[in-house]
Image: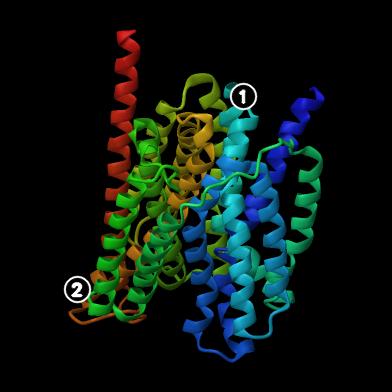
Amino acid sequence: MGTQSKNKWLILITTSLMTFMTVLDASIVNIAMPAISTDLKIPMNRAEWAVSFYIILICMLITLFGKLGDEIGKIRIFQTGTVIFILGSLLCGLSHSLAMLLSGRLVQALGASMTMATNFGIITQIFPQNRRGRALGILNSFVSLGSIAGPGIGGLVLQTWTWQTIFMINVPVGLFTFGLGLFVLPHHAHPWRFQLDGRGFLLWALAILSLFTAIFWGQEIGFTQWRILGLIVLAIVLFGSFYHVEQHQAQPMLNFKIFNNHEFTVGLMCALLVFVTTFFANVLMPFYLEKTLALSAFAAGIVLMGIPIMMLITAPISGALADNHGAQGLTFTGLVLLTLAETYFAIMTPHQSFLWMIGAICLSGIGIGMFQSPNNSIIMSSVPKQYLGIAGSLNGLAREVGMILGLSLATSILYLGMSQRAGRHVTTYVTAHPEWFVTGMHLAYAVATLCGIIALLLTARRLWLERRGMSHE
């Protein structure tokens, strides 16, 4: 293996480590919220701001830095983002007030959005076509691990140390990643020439802020409240205004012509739907295992590790297979497996064999891993080089939006089903009536299955168009 080839894999390690940390920090804080609430003497809903601030700010900024990466260099943006994320983590780790914690989370989100916007673009640009699927598969494994492993890692840290340690562990890992990047990341002399689309960015940021405020606030007070409906209408108007402005900009922040690319657009839509489907399990499965089946938290954690473990095993393999045999068939097969697993979850009962559920959980992880790596390869390989930054940032945005929509939809549909079964408004697990939860869970997983079917149909059409095109050649 030559030096240049070794550097490619060291670059992959650099981007993967940073990706893991930034994605992890979106979920690891959840388990620390009771400790943060107690230590800072604040209500739980204010402690939750540490999570919502981070996610909202990333979604506001990620497309801007995707565009900036295309203009002045993705590696420059990535390395700068790494330093900013380390500083934000240090600020969070030293926090002893809510204001200081939120300030640190703001700085973290700024750095995280810079690295998330450029990581897929860097790997796509560095690796040749015949190695790209495998590399993106490994990177995607770290994304998946970061998004799911947060509660487990956070729980282990909190058993021994304070909640501030959750943030402080980012500092040495981040410094190592930055130092490695200085040696292995190529340095290109990109000019510092960038025309900021100020109006477009402002409209985009306000639209994201309105939409996600409606989602987070709606979970507390209900989505039928006039304030929530007003925020949703405002978000729609702002998104419409953003589209209109971008159509008339010489240098738009988001060039909508990228969506004329059928493979890119379908890949992005399917990625969003799969992340929505995946995060239903994050809400529903812990309750089902611990409350309905009466497993310990440790046993439930072991069972749920089946999903990330299968994803970690499958993603690099499916990426390598995509390099040699094509990506379309693998994405279709992965979605078939995921949809079968979600269908089982929508009908399973506490009286069925435990092994069936274990099998469905593992099948879900295999399906996600088999789908995501080839789908990322399709998304990133379908756009010209000058759009790699914005394509990578939109891919990251689909992940964040899918995660939030999955969590909020799962909660809302769960409580709807439980309330219908109970004949009254229910917003918590009622120990005396586990059948209420099972009814709500079945309804929620039915919606998750529907999302999987829609993604499956979109992918089937994409596969059919590819096969038809090949037959006409």
The residue sitting at the bottom extreme is 41
Give whichever of discs 2 and 1 has the lower sequence position.
Answer: 1
Residue type, label 2: Gln
Occupied quadrant, residue 256: top left
Quadrant of image for the N terminus: top right
**Dot 2: few (<14), some (14–19), or many (≥20) neighbours within 10 Å?**
some
Q: Nearer the viewer, residue 446 or 102?
A: 102
| Residue 309 appears in the picture as rendered | no
Residue type, label 1: Pro
Q: Is residue 384 left or right of residue 206?
A: right
Occupied quadrant, residue 310: top right
| Residue 165 appears in the picture as rendered | yes
Q: Residue 141: x percent and y percent? A: 58, 44
The residue pinned by badge 2 equals 420
Image height of 99 relative to 268, above or below = below
The residue pinned by badge 1 equals 128
Image height of 447 relative to 88, above or below = above
Q: Residue 155: x percent and y percent? A: 63, 70
Q: Residue 225: x percent and y percent? A: 24, 79
Q: Residue at x 62, y 24 (%)?
A: 128
Do the residues bearing badges 2 and 1 touch, measured as CB atoms within 8 Å? Answer: no
Q: Residue 159: x percent and y percent? A: 69, 75
Q: Nearer the viewer, residue 181 or 149?
A: 181
